[in-house]
Amino acid sequence: MEKWLLPSIAIFGACTHVPPKPTSLSIADCQYLSKESQDVVDVTACAEVDAKDQITFHSAFLQQLTRSPSHGPHCVQVKRGSSWTPYYVLANGQNRPTLSLDNGCDDFAEGLARTPVAGRIGFMNESLTIVVEPKYEWAFPFDQGKARVCNQISWVQDGESKSMASGSCGSINKTGELNSPLQAIKK
Protein backbone atom coordinates (compact mmCIF):
# COMPACT_ATOMS: atom_id res chain seq x y z
CA MET A 1 0.00 0.00 0.00
CA GLU A 2 1.39 3.42 -0.97
CA LYS A 3 1.88 6.05 1.68
CA TRP A 4 0.91 9.58 0.69
CA LEU A 5 2.89 12.21 2.53
CA LEU A 6 2.08 15.28 0.46
CA PRO A 7 -1.14 16.15 -1.35
CA SER A 8 -1.24 14.21 -4.61
CA ILE A 9 -3.75 13.60 -7.30
CA ALA A 10 -3.94 10.27 -9.07
CA ILE A 11 -6.15 9.88 -12.13
CA PHE A 12 -7.92 6.56 -12.67
CA GLY A 13 -9.86 6.70 -15.95
CA ALA A 14 -12.29 9.61 -15.75
CA CYS A 15 -12.24 9.67 -11.97
CA THR A 16 -10.00 11.86 -9.78
CA HIS A 17 -8.87 10.51 -6.41
CA VAL A 18 -7.30 12.72 -3.75
CA PRO A 19 -5.70 10.55 -1.04
CA PRO A 20 -6.36 11.62 2.55
CA LYS A 21 -3.62 13.50 4.35
CA PRO A 22 -2.15 11.90 7.47
CA THR A 23 -3.49 13.46 10.64
CA SER A 24 -0.03 14.10 12.02
CA LEU A 25 3.34 14.46 10.36
CA SER A 26 6.60 15.19 12.12
CA ILE A 27 10.05 15.90 10.77
CA ALA A 28 13.02 13.82 11.92
CA ASP A 29 16.76 14.51 11.90
CA CYS A 30 19.35 11.86 11.04
CA GLN A 31 22.96 10.83 11.57
CA TYR A 32 24.99 8.28 9.69
CA LEU A 33 28.61 7.25 9.45
CA SER A 34 30.17 8.17 6.12
CA LYS A 35 31.66 5.03 4.62
CA GLU A 36 34.25 7.15 2.80
CA SER A 37 35.52 9.45 5.56
CA GLN A 38 34.32 7.53 8.62
CA ASP A 39 32.91 10.83 9.95
CA VAL A 40 29.48 11.17 11.52
CA VAL A 41 27.24 13.14 9.16
CA ASP A 42 24.35 15.11 10.69
CA VAL A 43 21.35 15.82 8.45
CA THR A 44 18.50 18.10 9.52
CA ALA A 45 14.99 17.22 8.36
CA CYS A 46 15.99 14.00 6.57
CA ALA A 47 12.66 12.21 6.97
CA GLU A 48 9.00 12.47 7.86
CA VAL A 49 7.19 10.34 10.40
CA ASP A 50 3.46 9.81 9.89
CA ALA A 51 0.67 9.21 12.41
CA LYS A 52 1.24 5.44 12.17
CA ASP A 53 4.92 5.92 13.12
CA GLN A 54 6.14 5.02 9.60
CA ILE A 55 9.30 6.78 8.41
CA THR A 56 9.71 8.10 4.89
CA PHE A 57 13.19 9.38 4.04
CA HIS A 58 13.43 12.38 1.73
CA SER A 59 14.85 11.61 -1.72
CA ALA A 60 17.65 14.19 -1.31
CA PHE A 61 18.76 12.41 1.87
CA LEU A 62 18.68 9.01 0.16
CA GLN A 63 20.84 10.36 -2.66
CA GLN A 64 23.32 11.78 -0.14
CA LEU A 65 23.32 8.54 1.85
CA THR A 66 23.88 6.28 -1.14
CA ARG A 67 26.72 8.29 -2.72
CA SER A 68 29.18 6.05 -0.94
CA PRO A 69 29.13 2.48 -2.22
CA SER A 70 27.49 -0.05 0.03
CA HIS A 71 26.74 -3.71 -0.31
CA GLY A 72 23.57 -3.83 1.72
CA PRO A 73 21.63 -1.49 3.97
CA HIS A 74 22.97 1.73 5.48
CA CYS A 75 22.83 2.36 9.23
CA VAL A 76 21.00 5.61 10.04
CA GLN A 77 20.24 7.00 13.48
CA VAL A 78 16.88 8.83 13.44
CA LYS A 79 16.10 11.41 16.12
CA ARG A 80 12.56 11.04 17.41
CA GLY A 81 11.85 13.55 20.16
CA SER A 82 14.94 13.56 22.35
CA SER A 83 16.14 10.02 21.59
CA TRP A 84 17.88 8.36 18.66
CA THR A 85 16.64 5.13 17.07
CA PRO A 86 18.80 3.04 14.71
CA TYR A 87 17.37 2.03 11.32
CA TYR A 88 18.70 0.10 8.39
CA VAL A 89 17.87 1.91 5.15
CA LEU A 90 18.09 0.70 1.55
CA ALA A 91 18.77 2.99 -1.44
CA ASN A 92 15.06 2.87 -2.39
CA GLY A 93 14.06 4.22 1.05
CA GLN A 94 12.81 0.94 2.47
CA ASN A 95 13.73 0.87 6.15
CA ARG A 96 13.39 -1.15 9.29
CA PRO A 97 14.37 -0.39 12.90
CA THR A 98 17.12 -2.40 14.51
CA LEU A 99 18.76 -2.58 17.92
CA SER A 100 21.47 -0.16 18.97
CA LEU A 101 24.98 -1.57 19.25
CA ASP A 102 27.73 0.79 20.46
CA ASN A 103 25.76 3.81 19.20
CA GLY A 104 25.30 2.20 15.79
CA CYS A 105 23.12 -0.48 14.27
CA ASP A 106 23.04 -4.10 15.36
CA ASP A 107 25.48 -6.03 13.16
CA PHE A 108 24.29 -8.59 10.64
CA ALA A 109 25.51 -11.87 12.12
CA GLU A 110 25.40 -14.76 9.66
CA GLY A 111 23.27 -12.57 7.37
CA LEU A 112 20.63 -11.64 9.97
CA ALA A 113 20.14 -8.65 12.29
CA ARG A 114 17.66 -8.18 15.11
CA THR A 115 14.62 -5.96 14.58
CA PRO A 116 12.15 -4.76 17.22
CA VAL A 117 8.46 -4.82 16.25
CA ALA A 118 5.73 -3.91 18.74
CA GLY A 119 7.91 -4.64 21.76
CA ARG A 120 9.16 -8.01 20.47
CA ILE A 121 12.35 -8.98 18.66
CA GLY A 122 12.68 -10.88 15.41
CA PHE A 123 15.34 -11.14 12.72
CA MET A 124 15.65 -9.53 9.27
CA ASN A 125 17.94 -10.26 6.35
CA GLU A 126 19.97 -7.66 4.41
CA SER A 127 16.95 -7.03 2.13
CA LEU A 128 15.15 -5.95 5.35
CA THR A 129 12.70 -8.84 5.05
CA ILE A 130 11.67 -10.35 8.38
CA VAL A 131 12.74 -14.00 8.29
CA VAL A 132 12.17 -14.84 11.97
CA GLU A 133 8.92 -13.45 13.34
CA PRO A 134 9.26 -11.03 16.27
CA LYS A 135 7.91 -13.01 19.19
CA TYR A 136 10.67 -12.80 21.80
CA GLU A 137 11.33 -10.24 24.51
CA TRP A 138 15.06 -10.59 23.85
CA ALA A 139 17.27 -12.33 21.31
CA PHE A 140 21.01 -12.64 20.99
CA PRO A 141 22.75 -12.50 17.57
CA PHE A 142 23.16 -15.67 15.54
CA ASP A 143 26.32 -17.69 16.10
CA GLN A 144 26.99 -20.99 14.34
CA GLY A 145 23.41 -21.11 13.01
CA LYS A 146 21.73 -20.59 16.39
CA ALA A 147 20.41 -17.61 18.34
CA ARG A 148 19.47 -17.61 22.00
CA VAL A 149 15.96 -16.20 22.54
CA CYS A 150 14.17 -15.34 25.77
CA ASN A 151 10.73 -14.44 27.13
CA GLN A 152 9.34 -13.64 30.61
CA ILE A 153 12.47 -11.67 31.43
CA SER A 154 13.26 -9.86 34.63
CA TRP A 155 16.03 -7.26 34.19
CA VAL A 156 18.40 -5.80 36.78
CA GLN A 157 19.91 -2.34 36.26
CA ASP A 158 23.68 -2.22 36.76
CA GLY A 159 24.95 1.33 36.24
CA GLU A 160 24.45 2.26 32.58
CA SER A 161 23.67 -1.29 31.52
CA LYS A 162 21.19 -3.94 32.53
CA SER A 163 21.45 -7.69 32.80
CA MET A 164 18.95 -10.51 32.76
CA ALA A 165 18.08 -11.72 36.25
CA SER A 166 15.62 -14.42 35.20
CA GLY A 167 13.55 -15.57 32.26
CA SER A 168 12.85 -18.47 29.94
CA CYS A 169 15.45 -18.99 27.24
CA GLY A 170 16.08 -21.43 24.41
CA SER A 171 17.64 -21.34 20.95
CA ILE A 172 16.31 -21.05 17.41
CA ASN A 173 17.68 -21.73 13.95
CA LYS A 174 17.66 -19.23 11.07
CA THR A 175 14.09 -20.12 10.11
CA GLY A 176 12.84 -19.48 13.65
CA GLU A 177 12.35 -23.12 14.63
CA LEU A 178 13.26 -23.95 18.22
CA ASN A 179 16.46 -26.00 18.56
CA SER A 180 15.97 -26.16 22.30
CA PRO A 181 12.75 -25.23 24.11
CA LEU A 182 12.46 -22.18 26.34
CA GLN A 183 13.43 -23.16 29.85
CA ALA A 184 13.52 -21.12 33.05
CA ILE A 185 16.88 -19.60 33.91
CA LYS A 186 17.90 -17.74 37.02
CA LYS A 187 21.15 -16.03 37.91
Image (cartoon, rainbow, N blue to C red):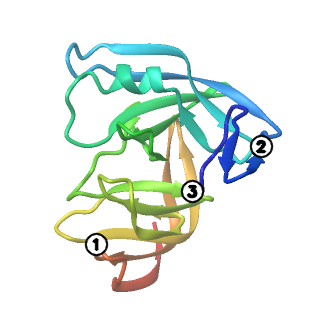
Q: Are marks 2 and 1 in contact (CB under 8 Å)?
A: no
Quarter of the image where one finds residue 103: top left
Give how far across and how far down residue 157 sits, in percent: 57, 46
Q: Which quadrant would the N terminus be assigned to in this image?
A: bottom right
Q: Which residue is drawn at 42% across and 31% down?
A: 76
Mark number for residue 174?
Answer: 1
Mark whose residue sits in front, 2 or 3: 2
Q: In which quarter of the image is residue 171?
A: bottom left
Q: Which residue is drawn at 19% across and 28% down?
A: 69
Mark 3 element type: strand
The residue closer to the viewer here, 118 or 180, is: 118
Q: Whole-percent x and y of residue 79?
A: 58, 26
The circle drawn on residue 18 is: 2
User: In the figure, 45 relative to 124: above or below?
Assistant: above
Q: In this view, does 151 lie to the left or right of 66?
A: right
The residue lying furthest to the right in this view is 23
Q: What residue type is labelled 3?
A: Trp
- Residue at which label 3 appears: 155
Q: Dot 3: within a 10 Å radius of its alpha carbon, few (fewer than 14), some, or many (20 or more) residues?
A: few
Mark 2, secondary structure of its residue: loop
Q: What residue type is labelled 2?
A: Val
